Amino acid sequence: KAGVTQTPRYLIKTRGQQVTLSCSPISGHRSVSWYQQTPGQGLQFLFEYFSETQRNKGNFPGRFSGRQFSNSRSEMNVSTLELGDSALYLCASSWYRGWGKTEAFFGQGTRLTVV
Amino acid sequence: SQQGEEDPQALSIQEGENATMNCSYKTSINNLQWYRQNSGRGLVHLILIRSNEREKHSGRLRVTLDTSKKSSSLLITASRAADTASYFCATDRIIQGAQKLVFGQGTRLTINP
């Protein structure tokens, strides 16, 4: 079974631009979550999608948005990029199987550098 | 905000020794998971322990959970150079089926040959 695929792996953007990151979950997984990892803040939860609906959102500004398609693939968009948005963006997919049994499987991440 | 806090922040041991990492959290949880991350790469799931479990094993890994103290520990026995990585605990709060993992800052483990 293929793992979680994130594209692109690396990205360099200029301040003020926008960027779209993509995540293809493991086949059969309907939940996709996004996380931002920086040296200063660690791993921070961005949002979670299930069946094309955002169910959970972290404490990030409205410049960060996402969506999920009917095939469970998800995209994350960041508009008006700031230097502080430079980070490793990780996507995780999971299959909710009831209370206490939801291992999340992560992709390799997209390393975004804003210059 | 970070819920889990790992300690130590960094740990360096000799190959073959055991490594113990601890994690504390603040609120009630459904389960707790441990992940490994090799330098700048994705996270690899290691073990999930439910809130009604006290101990779990997987190969050379042993995880304990003490919900009364809101703490967990990860023990790696007979460490190998390949175990060099950062280790994170993540608490899992599932609300109406929606999952949100809250990670600690991680422990950077270095195994010296």
Image (tube, rainbow, N blue to C red):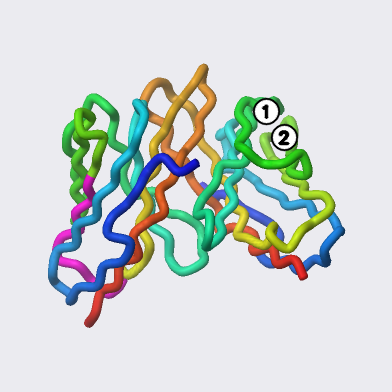
Report the residue at 26% width, 34% height from top.
B70
Q: Amino acid at mark 2?
A: Gln
Task: Tell which of A57 and A1 is nearer to you.
Answer: A57
- Residue A42: percent from the left, percent from the top? 50, 54
Residue positioned most to the right: A17
Q: Total number of numbered labels? A: 2
Residue A107, numbered label: none
Q: What residue do we see at 54% from left, 25% from top?
A: B98
Say what amino acid the circle numbered 1 marks: Gln
Which quadrant is the C terminus of chain A positioned in?
A: bottom right
Marks 1 and 2: in contact by CB < 8 Å?
yes
Q: Position of residue A18 (x, y in %)?
A: 84, 54
Residue bearing the label numbered 2: A68
**Mark 2, secondary structure of its residue:** strand
> Cα distance, mark 2 to mark 1?
8 Å
Highlighted magenta segment, given as a residue range? B73-82
Q: Which subunit holds the residue at mark 2?
A: A
- Let me know if residue B76 is in the magenta part: yes
Q: Nearer the viewer, residue A53 or B23?
A: B23
Q: Secondary structure at mark 1?
A: strand
- Few, some or many residues within 10 Å of mark 1 (<14, 14–19, 20+): some
Q: Which residue is mark 1?
A: A54
When asked about the image quadrant of residue B53, the answer is: top left
Looking at the image, residue A107 sits to the left or right of residue B36; the answer is right
Q: Position of residue A57 (x, y in %)?
A: 63, 32
